[in-house]
Amino acid sequence: MEYIVINGQKPLHGNVNISGAKNAAVAILPASIAAGDVCVIDNLPQIEDVSNMINAMRSMGVRCEFEDEHTLRVDARNMTGQVLEEKYARNMRASYYFMGAMLGKYGYAEVSRPGGCDLGARPIDYHLKGFTALGATCSQEHGVVKLTAEDGLKGANIYLDCPSVGATINIMMAAVFAEGTTLIENAAKEPHVVDAASFLNKIGAKIYGAGTANIRVKGVESLSGGDYTVLPDPIEAGTYMIAAAITNGDVTVENIIPKHMDSVTSKLKEMGCAITEGDDWIRVCGNNEGLRACEIKTAFYPGFPTDLQPQMTTLLCTAQGTSIVTENVFDARYRYVNEIRRLGAQLKIEGRVAVTKGSCTYTGAEVMATDLRAGAALVLAGLCAKGETVISEVGHLDRGYGRFEEKFRAIGADIKRIKKA
Ligand code: EPU
């Protein structure tokens, strides 16, 4: 078993280079199987979800070769099947993208229901409703979703009940080859939706309006190949920005798109952090007087991201005064709270609302990561805690953060990974 061990209370200083975005990479890789030629995808983060995605592609005969540690050459011209086995689908949420990509290109897909972090109910009904509206037949047996469209897909108007990231990208991928025009209304606007659309457009798709609530896809007969660079990860960047605040440090996150960070930047400013930004970097400095409480409501982009809620709530527990956090996206994203309580956090949860007492001083203890962002929150608490924090179940972190300990060590953290029987 692997554990992360942190000796806290070391202010962080220095620069962190942010990797490519996990949630863009795990959409672009499956989208690349729809290409008609070789694709070279750059700025891939070195994380488990990307390795799992590549293994899944290889299992269906897609040739994937690394040109360097961040650059993958994908050749899907001789794909051998459109059936994704359960062992590949279960270990990541993004395996659902094989449904849209394969249905669009081949008119057939068999994919086990996806796994991923346990954040409460995570249905895929919008994805399936969208495929059905495009003319596919969807059925499910023994946990496997089977999609067929023998006569091809036909463009349709699809309204999403809520702007789901996964459903937007999945329907967009299927619609790329549908006859006529598809309109996705109430579409997600997240940067990785725009990135997936930009990749598909680069190889010949006709997708208009990504980044707005109305995405229009004009069907094409085939796609080419091409090169693409994955956008920087706003959630990784936000995690290091909050790390600077919680350790009263001075950290610059580099290779980012500052606009994507607006909701985080404005909340950290409101709390009293000093923030400066340039074209592709943001510098966050803590505050010797201590930080102030504030109110956070998670929302779809450009709102405050649910994927930074655990890290932000962990920070707010240390601020002066009572903060109120409302989690509006997932119904069970407070599972980490019992763990940060072990480190000294004082907060109450009522349904979707967390109320922090504030002014807590974390003290090290043994805790367990319950999911990816929960693990990140525990690392942040450990970094500012008095004494030693030992975190178990760190495999969750490897799914989404590349070289996590190494990047923290480079800016002054006392953090290491150990193996124990
Ligand atoms: N929803 C439905 N039906 C659906 C799809 C979604 O009811 O068919 C609901 C969900 O239950 C949830 C809301 O819609 O309440 C939003 O879910 P969404 O589909 O946007 O989330 P997702 O596609 O499952 C992606 C990211 C998550 C991130 C969310 C929200 C990937 C692979 N995952 O999940 O990332 O939290 O969007 O931004 O892109 C993470 O990186 O830690 C992570 C969990």
Image (cartoon, helix red, strand yellow):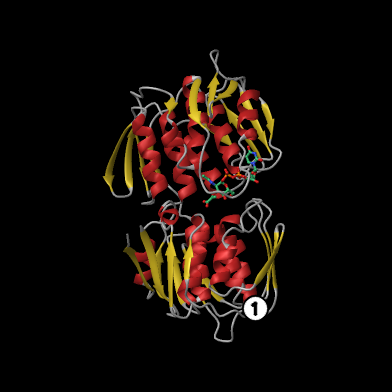
Q: Could you tell whether 157 is left or right of 419 in the image?
A: right
Q: In the displayed structure, would residue 198 be above or below residue 355?
A: above
Q: In the displayed structure, would residue 285 be above or below residue 190?
A: below
Percent of width and height locating residue 270: 65, 73
Please tell me which residue is depicted at 62% across the width and 80% down the height of the picture.
Answer: 359
The residue that disc 1 covers is 292
Please tell me which residue is depicted at 46% across the width and 67% down the height of the picture.
Answer: 379
Q: Amino acid at mark 1?
A: Arg
Percent of width and height locating residue 155: 62, 23
27 or 9, which lies in front? 9
Q: Could you tell whether 52 is left or right of 163 in the image?
A: left
Q: Quadrant of residue 361?
A: bottom right
Please tell me which residue is depicted at 60% across the width and 26% down the height of the picture.
Answer: 131
Percent of width and height locating residue 337: 59, 64
Q: Secondary structure at mark 1?
A: loop
Say whether residue 173 is visible. yes
201 or 117, which lies in front? 117
- Which image quarter has ligand 1? top right
Q: In the displayed structure, would residue 63 be above or below residue 287?
A: above
Please tell me which residue is depicted at 51% across the width and 29% down the height of the picture.
Answer: 99
122 or 24, which lies in front? 122
Q: Could you tell whether 277 is left or right of 39 in the image?
A: right
